[in-house]
């Protein structure tokens, strides 16, 4: 057995383990979650004359709903829950705090709306890509 064949066999074993440990998501889950997370970020835009916590709370509800959707699908598939790493959790909390604080800040101008919209689009793209990796037919060799 040469090195190329060994590498091929190891890659196949790794792919089969990954497929059994984490079954693929249905096709509709990645785009729905991506839109929900992207909208949650875009809703943090500072608004002129619109005080209150309405938009940040709706954004939080969207983000939690998207997370619950993925966890619900995973639970129906029988996938064991994975522990969230402390670094990822800290990054999410800090990012949410920064966006929410800047959206509630009265000195923020609405000229920054494009930044929040662009951030929402980037977040949606990242979420879609990360979830799309586990959809059947999306394997990249």
Image: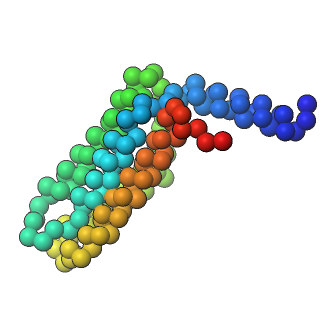
The percent position of residue 78, horizontal first and vertical second, equals 45, 21
Instruction: Say whether residue 22 is visible.
Output: yes
Q: Give the colour scheme of this rendering.
A: rainbow
- Give the residue furthest to the right: 1
Q: Is residue 129 above or below residue 43?
A: above
Please tell me which residue is depicted at 33% across the width and 53% down the height of the picture.
38
Q: Quadrant of the C terminus?
A: top right
Q: Quadrant of the N terminus?
A: top right
The percent position of residue 101, horizontal first and vertical second, equals 25, 65
Instruction: Say whether residue 90 is visible.
Output: no
The percent position of residue 105, horizontal first and vertical second, equals 20, 71
**Is residue 140 found left or right of 93 in the rendered image?**
right
Please tell me which residue is depicted at 29% across the width and 70% down the height of the picture.
114
Q: Is residue 44 above or below residue 113?
A: above
**Is residue 23 found left or right of 75 in the rendered image?**
right
Please tell me which residue is depicted at 42% across the width and 53% down the height of the picture.
125
**Is residue 135 found left or right of 76 in the rendered image?**
right
The percent position of residue 126, horizontal first and vertical second, equals 45, 52
Please tell me which residue is depicted at 21% across the width and 56% down the height of the picture.
56
- Give the residue furthest to the front: 137
């Amino acid at each position: 057995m040469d090195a190329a064949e060994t590498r091929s066999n190891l890659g196949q074993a790794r792919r089969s383990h990954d497929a059994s440990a984490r079954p693929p998501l249905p096709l509709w889950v990645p785009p729905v979650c991506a839109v929900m997370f992207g909208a949650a970020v875009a809703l943090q835009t500072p608004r002129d004359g619109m005080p209150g916590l309405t938009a940040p709370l709706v954004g939080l509800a969207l983000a939690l709903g998207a997370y619950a959707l993925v966890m619900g699908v995973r639970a129906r598939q029988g996938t064991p829950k994975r522990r969230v790493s402390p670094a990822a959790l800290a990054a999410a909390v800090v990012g949410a705090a920064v966006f929410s604080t800047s959206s509630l800040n009265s000195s923020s101008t609405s000229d920054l709306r494009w930044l929040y919209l662009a951030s929402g689009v980037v977040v949606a793209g990242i979420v879609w890509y990360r979830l799309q990796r586990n959809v059947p037919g999306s394997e990249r060799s």
